[in-house]
Image (cartoon, rainbow, N blue to C red):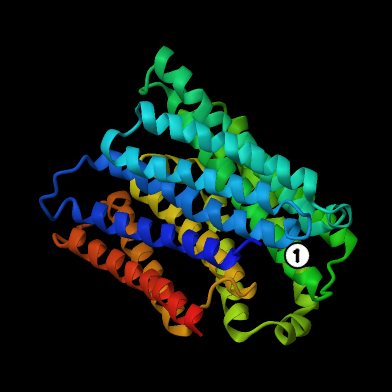
Amino acid sequence: MINTKKYSLLALGYFLLIAILGVLLRSFPVADFNFNYKHVVHAHSHIALLGWVYTAFMVLIYQLYLRHSAIDKKYKRLFWFTQFTIVGMLASFPFTGYALFSILFSTLFLITSYAFSHMVFKHTPITQKQTNSFKCMRIGLWYMIISSIGPLALGVIMNTLGSTSSWYRNAIYFYLHFQYNGWFILALFGVLIYVFERHDIKISKTGFNRFYIYINLGVILTFTISILWMGLHSTINGLAGIGGLIQIVALVFLVRELYRQKNEIKANFTKVYYWILKITLICFSVKLLLQYAGTFPNNMEAISSNIDFIIGYLHWVFLGVVSLTLLGFLNYFKLIKLTKTGLILYVFGFLLLEAIIFYKGLTIWLNLHLPENYLFYILISSIVLLIGILVVFVQQFLFNKD
């Protein structure tokens, strides 16, 4: 018997941990801490993507597709070995950065992710393999596998071309693109469509096929956005723009289908879950618009040279689209409990942090004055976000008592 609530709590624990690391990183310029900033950044990013998000998806995928497949022992062994690799990264990255043990644990994690993908492909019931939700989840897992080419290539690049080469930067962007825009987004759509299928909220075959083709074509084409900084031929800009526009069209197709079912969606979901759906839809729409805006040459030059715009965008996707939606799904399947207090604190902290990060980016872009106490403000916003996540985490113990 798999205790999915316990596994979900572990995922939430990683979320809390990365929020603590985030506050630590924001404290670095205003306090005298004796640690290597870059090493902690590596730990923060790895535990965010591989600890919180991956573990949450591992739980949700089991809940959706594997719990009736009689593979609990195999799943449990794989789950806990995966956690071993994550803890190994957590214990090594802050102290050594990219070195022997951190690379070893990262490589072991990649192997476990391949094994998990194989498990899902092999053991999902045939009836579910025909569903629209599984089609999204399957392609999402393939994007995760494809993304691993990036970190696997880093070792070769560092030994041959060095960390200052354009290939090094592009390998990182390749990984992030297929994680953020491929694996995470398609997996989230997979869970969302599963929830609709569960309530017999139907998306027309034509509507889904259009959405599926356009969103995936967009994933492939928008990788070119990641290499616009190299100043390549204008054709690359054109492909990037087409990819960004195609993904907006894909969302329009899906929203149009869901709008027709608006009353059924309202009737079948709680106010909290419906509220999360609306917020994340807005966040995802903003993400697509920002992505498309970044394909125009003038904007591209401003963004590629402005680290705050890049960090703000990545945090917008991670905190506003991926993490908030995951919290909503875990709550929907009764794996965690969410209250208005925790959610409001989280969303407020997230929006405050984003506003301050993008404000700094705008001051650099427009050559405006940046307040001297900017670093203090961004630290405070990170603490507010941490408090929101802490409230959500602590409430789980009250929930489990009940």
Report the amino acid beneath label 1: Tyr
Point out residue 10 in the picture as x, y percentages from the top left corner: 47, 60
Point out residue 64 in the picture as x, y percentages from the top left corner: 72, 61
Q: Residue at x 50, y 56 (%)?
A: 317
Q: Residue at x 60, y 32 (%)?
A: 236
Q: Nearer the viewer, residue 332 or 243?
A: 332
Answer above or below: position of 84 versus 369: above
Point out residue 100 in the picture as x, y percentages from the top left corner: 37, 26
Whether residue 161 is visible to the viewer of this picture, yes or no, is: no
Q: Quadrant of residue 8?
A: bottom right
Of all residues shown, which one is farthest toward the top?
A: 160
Answer above or below: position of 384 versus 248: below
Q: Residue at x 44, y 25 (%)?
A: 168
Q: Residue at x 78, y 55 (%)?
A: 69
Q: Going by the image, does 98 lie left or right of 75?
A: left
Q: Secondary structure at mark 1?
A: helix
Q: Nearer the viewer, residue 337 or 71?
A: 71
**What residue sits right under mark 1 in the picture?**
194
* Few, some or many residues within 10 Å of mark 1 (<14, 14–19, 20+): many
Q: Going by the image, does 205 lie left or right of 266?
A: right
Point out residue 101 in the picture as x, y percentages from the top left corner: 38, 30
Of all residues shown, which one is farthest toward the left?
A: 32
Q: Going by the image, does 37 lie left or right of 81?
A: left
